[in-house]
């Protein structure tokens, strides 16, 4: 009889719970990881609200690190006992999308998102990783599990937001919303040479963290139109680059409005809950002729990129751990998940240990 | 007393007529051109409907060529008698936008559009060109006025649509609408290495011209959902690149729907008449995470680019003149303008001679 | 006892011959192909001269198509009997280089070049392909073996030369040498929107083919300095883009000299026989400050790209088969190889059938 | 009679001195600046050695700031009394090269370099600036003259070195030589998201400054082959990006050797004294097929870029002033120049005040 493990699973709309399942088996290219810690992600909260349709008892979670428990027969770079991280997105590396460089869209739209989307997630005692040689990365000894966890989604997504924003050296950037993805985008904008970084956030603790991570100005959107404040801070001109990291139609529109002609709107917010369409205001879009650009992205995965993100932490240029506001043992994961839904107690990221 | 000239002018909403005005004077960097021929552009039809607010008696037109009549004291590259073309967009070349390379946004949103937008247009016996050394271009002897006229807007805009579309060599492209801008985008897509070009057009004469200019398949949007046909023609996957050259919300949405994840939507349609917003369908946009990109553009100007477009005609790689469906003397310009509004007699581009 | 097959092999410096070897076995991700036809490549001639050190009895050849004979247990996209092509470069798709997009450098410098370089080549009755799901491509029914063969190296390499050359639409391009790679680069430059294409070639038959494939001017380098002629053809200014497709120090220097400031030198020539260094002339390089760029490339592989190249042939936009000047059965492959070394009888590409 | 001014001038090979000349007159687009301070640049030392041929009594210097003394009749953005900086490179903004975006090559090879190269330099009490609306920039009140001076050449050149280096976020970068340009490139690499920055420098004070500005490791090239040390620091693989900021053949070759396949060599060193050619080692260049790229640049000018560089200093993200090791009144400028030639007393940059 197969050994079993505990897993946080979707049990129906707005319902989650820890269940037992057999420990998964690896195919020839795969690995099974024994989890040591995880972070809870708001996108799972969206999923549990029904934004994505998934079967009941599907495991949740996509931000975990651990120890290699078993590897498939064809895995070459990893062996049992290795301490590893794995990105939330786990492309195959060989389909047409992967070959074109769009690994997040592996096999088709958003197809690189396999945890929870296509199989059990990794907020579980053990989890399965496809194409281990493409997706696993060794965690350097000098980094804690907690640091490595931030590379699996938050930093990779936030940095993609900044990388896609076409920030000119010394240019002006705004980041809408300073949740963990937006905070990571702020770190990214600072890393990539922005001159003036204006973030938009009303919660005082997040605003403070935003300044710590690189914001030169924090605009409170509850105190008047944030776009007007951004225009005021940029001589009425608007910013070179706007990063949408909330995933709401209004924020997206504000990004269009806050950029100058020729500017770039980089979207990393997941628009799963704001309706079926996004709206572009035409006057600020120059009636389609403003030379503005909208670029979207899903968290880029792969070992090579993960290694570069880990390097930034190793060398001390990035430390995302101030985002960890709460810590729980896996036995209290349901409580952590609940708090992530309510955002109570100013939670930003809860760390789960096994 | 200043000499006068005739000019096609805006006389109120839906009202145009030929009026007399003094021949303009050049400032030190400017030139005055004696017009020899013009093309009528549909965007003027939009303007006359009131889409852009302009004063009465403002001259219309932005696609003209002619002979240098006078030059300002600082003009170095051109002299009286030179045969020249000038792009519809005439940037100053020295403001911040021009220095960033966004010359179409000279001085601010859409600011490179000076004819009609900021001063009299060039469907007149004489016209004024700012920053002549930046904006004028000598027409090679081997090219007709008619050929050169297509470089002033249609080809420059259409090619920008293709250049911004990130077409992979041998990739798949769709161009929505085959008016003169769309036909030029089709030429551009062919020039830039597209493998499969699918255009969307219902009018038979335009469909035929589309094939002549490079379309491998022409989809008739009156015969069912064109996006479905595009998907069928691309193994259900969608195209790498979609070019919007109509300027309607539905067509823009279809571009989002017709592209594969990671694909690019290149907008060159002027969305002046379709309402105050564009709408992005979220499922086909991957909820903002599809790696899709939307790039907009206004006709890029400047002598250097004009020279490259003229070269393509000189060498015989491009011949846009089959788009000229009608010819009129300037005395009948009101009639030509009227036909451009009604699109009667399958008009595509009417040529005006002086 | 394993079945055997015939293979053209390296037998020592300047010595080749057909030998017998066992038909190879596939690993789990691999495929074995029964060859139906091959093209002989000049780079094998370089190899046999000792430019690359390989063991005796190593098989030659890297441009072959055939029928899938066996597949490994993990291969998903291909099965026995499929008619397939495979690029000369066969990356793994999962190492750090592949993940960065430099698949030609799979695992390290030039590491994507596995045929002959790391294992037996494919000028043999059967051959082994690593990572079949990444590297094999189905040949469309409408294409001949001969056409598909050109996608395996010549067109992929030549197109890379043009893709890397930063050709502005309507810009000026020169291609040095019109052997099969240079001719393919000429096709590529035409496909990618060049305005004026100047090729450099002295042999009349190659010059004629060059014009057929897209050259607007062919300069004969035996009739005076070709760079001076290129300058004369471009108003003394030089070209936007120069493509080196011979692999000789002098040609490389000429590319530096023939480009205008800000221009790009795209190298696809294999500099295996011209010594241990390339030389950059400093005055024409602006003493390192000319804004000139030198970009190098090795034939990019992978199914997705191969499919796009095949599509260009399917739709009829590219037909490289006029390059096939000679045809031999595999029994005469030694003779074909010999001719490729001597270039006798104006040989360009010899086709081998099995 | 015209008023006169003092100017540091070239008086013959290896000979400089302060001479008197009339204060220059502005043309319609020009401005005359009364100098308040300057930095001395090593490239003038090269010039005085005869690397560039200039007439005797030609003024030296291209790093100066001051107060607008007079403006030409067409200048719109600046007026007498404005406190301004001007880049070492002063493009016209309207020639073909400027329109293509290669403003440093204004009018032809290195043509944006007008001070000293084409007219008197600006190490003088007054100096002439062509195309003032393109080239002047207001210095923000919060910045000192000394800070603004670094934007005129050192930071703009050094940042260009980093911008051209294709640094992946968290990637590895080496900068060869830590003179003022190399130190600025190190600041640039830090600003643009490098993970590991390895600089090469033997002088202890420069090594220390290098660490202060962003180097994670400093390699001493007098203690063994620096390329070997760079390989050791990158697991034998080499760096993503190498920046040449010395201008010597050996350093250029080391950049080729130190980069991994697919890496970029960004040259900002001025190769005026190392002979007539640069040499590329073929094995480390993959015989022209390594996917390596060499990009060159001359200091990019223009107000818009200058504003972004000034912004980085205003906000406090960059402070280059620790490079100022010596200060002199203009009466001692000959002594300062002499020290820059001998590099005595560990001089990096001497500041001249008027």
Image (cartoon, coloured by chain):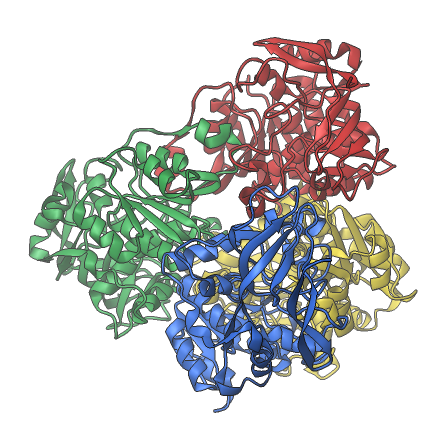
Chain colours: A green, B red, C yellow, D blue
Residue C86 placement (x, y as % from top left): 59, 58
Residue B255 visible in the picture: yes
Residue C59 visible in the picture: no
Q: Quadrant of residue A195?
A: bottom left
Judged from this view, the residue extending furthest toward the front is: D1
As drawn, is B88 to the left or to the right of A266?
Answer: right
Quadrant placement of the C terminus of chain C: bottom right
D113 above or below C304? Answer: below
Residue D98 placement (x, y as % from top left): 66, 50
As drawn, is D17 to the left or to the right of A248?
Answer: right
Could you tell me which residue is drawn at 67 percent across and 35 percent down?
B156
The one nearer the camera, B96 or C130, is: B96
Judged from this view, the residue extending furthest toward the right is: C223
B84 above or below D44? Answer: above
A154 above or below A133? Answer: above
Residue D129 placement (x, y as % from top left): 64, 55
The one nearer the camera, D91 or B248, is: D91
What number of labels is visible?
0
As drawn, is B8 to the left or to the right of A160?
Answer: right
Residue A157 placement (x, y as % from top left): 33, 52
Could you tell me which residue is drawn at 81 percent across and 36 percent down?
B139
The one nearer the camera, A326 or A219, is: A219
Q: Quadrant of residue C60?
A: bottom right
């Amino acid at each position: 009889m197969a050994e079993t493990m505990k897993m946080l699973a979707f049990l129906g709309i707005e319902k989650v719970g820890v269940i037992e399942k057999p420990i998964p088996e690896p195919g020839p290219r795969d690995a099974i990881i024994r989890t040591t810690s995880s972070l809870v992600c708001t996108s799972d909260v969206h999923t549990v609200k029904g934004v994505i349709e998934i079967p009941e008892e599907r495991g949740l979670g996509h931000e975990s690190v651990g120890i290699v428990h078993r590897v498939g027969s064809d895995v070459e770079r990893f062996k049992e006992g290795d301490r590893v991280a794995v990105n939330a997105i786990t492309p195959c590396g060989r389909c047409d999308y992967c070959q074109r460089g769009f690994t997040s869209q592996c096999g088709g739209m958003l197809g690189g998102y396999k945890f929870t989307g296509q199989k059990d997630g990794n907020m579980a005692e053990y989890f399965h990783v496809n194409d281990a040689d493409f997706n696993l990365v060794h965690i350097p000894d000098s980094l804690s599990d907690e640091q490595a966890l931030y590379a699996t989604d938050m930093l990779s997504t936030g940095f993609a937001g900044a990388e896609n924003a076409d920030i000119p050296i010394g240019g002006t950037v705004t980041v809408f919303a300073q949740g963990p993805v937006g905070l990571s985008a702020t770190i990214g904008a600072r890393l990539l040479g922005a001159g003036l970084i204006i973030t938009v956030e009303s919660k005082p603790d997040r605003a403070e963290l935003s300044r710590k991570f690189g914001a030169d100005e924090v605009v409170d959107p509850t105190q008047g139109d944030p776009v007007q404040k951004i225009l005021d801070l940029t001589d009425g001109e608007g910013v070179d680059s706007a990063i949408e990291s909330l995933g709401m139609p209004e924020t997206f529109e504000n990004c269009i409005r806050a950029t100058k002609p020729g500017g770039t709107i980089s979207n990393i917010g997941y628009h799963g809950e704001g309706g079926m369409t996004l709206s572009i205001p035409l006057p600020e879009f120059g009636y389609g002729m403003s030379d503005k650009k909208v670029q979207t992205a899903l968290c880029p995965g792969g070992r090579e990129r993960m290694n570069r993100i880990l390097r930034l932490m190793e060398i001390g240029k990035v430390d995302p751990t101030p985002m960890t506001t709460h810590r729980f043992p896996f036995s209290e994961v349901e409580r952590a998940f609940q708090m992530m839904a309510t955002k109570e107690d100013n939670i930003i990221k809860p760390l789960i240990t096994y």
